[in-house]
Image (tube, rainbow, N blue to C red):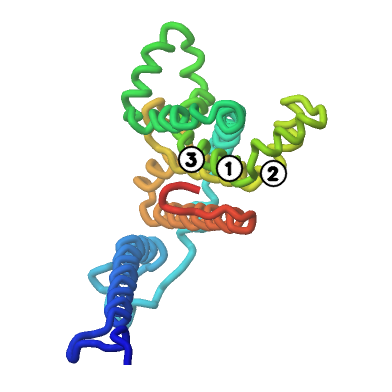
Amino acid sequence: MSAAGLTTPGRPSPAGRRRRGTTGAELARWGFLLALGLFFLLPQLAMARFAFQNIPVATLTLGTLTDSWSLRRLGEALTEPGLWEAAQVSVTLAVLAIVLNLALLLPLAVLAEIRAPRLRPVLTGVTLLPWVIPPIALVVGVAATFRTIAPWFLSSTLSLVPFYALWAMPFTYRALDAGLRAINARTLVEAAQSLGASMPTVLLRVIVPNMSASIVAASGLTAATVLGEFAFASLLLKETLPTYLVVYQRQAPQAGMALALALLLLTTLALGAVVQLLRRRGLGVTTTGI
């Protein structure tokens, strides 16, 4: 018998220790995911019970936990005309913010990928700057500047578009950068230019069609950011969907909570659809980016 096949009596083999270590790591990982899921799920269940169950907490028992559930409060919230006006404003702002972000960042991301790869860390840092500056400081500084130069800018609801575009820049740039690296953009551009295509033609007819999944991902993340952003609209005294929800919940707490849960569910489903689209196109989603 070879020495490699001998093990000391009473001691587990290296393979057994590795299996035990792997099992322990898996249990710790699943335990962490379970705790994280409960941390997010329990408040949502409490919100759902408050919004959709017509039983006071003082009289709630295990026997009545599934009784008197109704979607009546949600129906009341959906009949409010102010909801659809605020939703229309938020959707318009989201579309404009997506267009502005793509117009600014897509050419820069392509330039950094093809001509100047050293600019990529610089662009990454610049796009993170809006998250370094607090929203209140950003709004106060811009408002103080434009109040005397262009007061019409702050009086318009469209003044929120640049703020939303800035706030969504980290998501947009990372999605576009990941898409460019996934399609090997430099090779595509060199092949198209060797056939006589100009740079605008390469961008519109070669790069953009191959980056459809990344553009959809960037657009979805920007829309989710805009539809859930409250600070900028509140500081500039504009009525968007988040600010409307805050005011409406003060007037009708149950209906407002039901509406908030419905919007949360729709946003989650939309982001899930974006993730599935990315996976179908061969782009994975990790904790460090797309």
Q: Amino acid at mark 2?
A: Asn
Q: Residue at x 55, y 37 (%)?
A: 94
Q: Is residue 117 above or below residue 18?
A: above
Q: Secondary structure at mark 3?
A: helix
Q: Picture coordinates of residue 277 (x, y %)?
A: 61, 55
Q: CA distance from mark 2 to mark 3?
A: 19 Å
Q: Which residue is mark 3?
A: 171
Q: Nearer the viewer, mark 2 or mark 3?
A: 2
SS for tag 2?
helix
The extreme right residue here reads 195
Q: Image quarter for residue 112?
A: top right
Which tag, 1 or 3, sits closer to the chain's start? 3
Q: Is residue 239 left or right of residue 30?
A: right
Q: Position of residue 226 (x, y in %)?
A: 49, 38
Q: Is residue 84 visible?
A: no
Which label belongs to residue 210? 2
Q: Residue 115 or 198: which is nearer the viewer?
A: 115
**Residue 47, percent across and down?**
35, 60
Q: Earlier in the sequence, mark 2 or mark 1?
A: 1
Looking at the picture, which amino acid does disc 1 mark? Arg
Position of residue 40 relative to residue 288, above or below, is: below
Tell me which residue sits at (77%, 25%) in the image.
198
Residue at 41 percent of width and 27 percent of height: 237
Label 2 neighbour load within 10 Å: few <14, some 14-19, many 20+: some
User: What is the spatial separation of the Cα atoms under label 1 and label 3, in whole angstroms?
Assistant: 16 Å
Where is the N terminus found, in terms of image quarters? bottom left
> Please, is residue 23 above or below residue 39 in the view?
below
Which residue matches tag 1?
Answer: 181
Horizontal side, residue 103 vs residue 38: left or right = right
Q: Residue furthest front?
A: 2
Determine crowd level at label 1: few under 14, some 14-19, many 20+ residues with C-alpha closer than 10 A: few
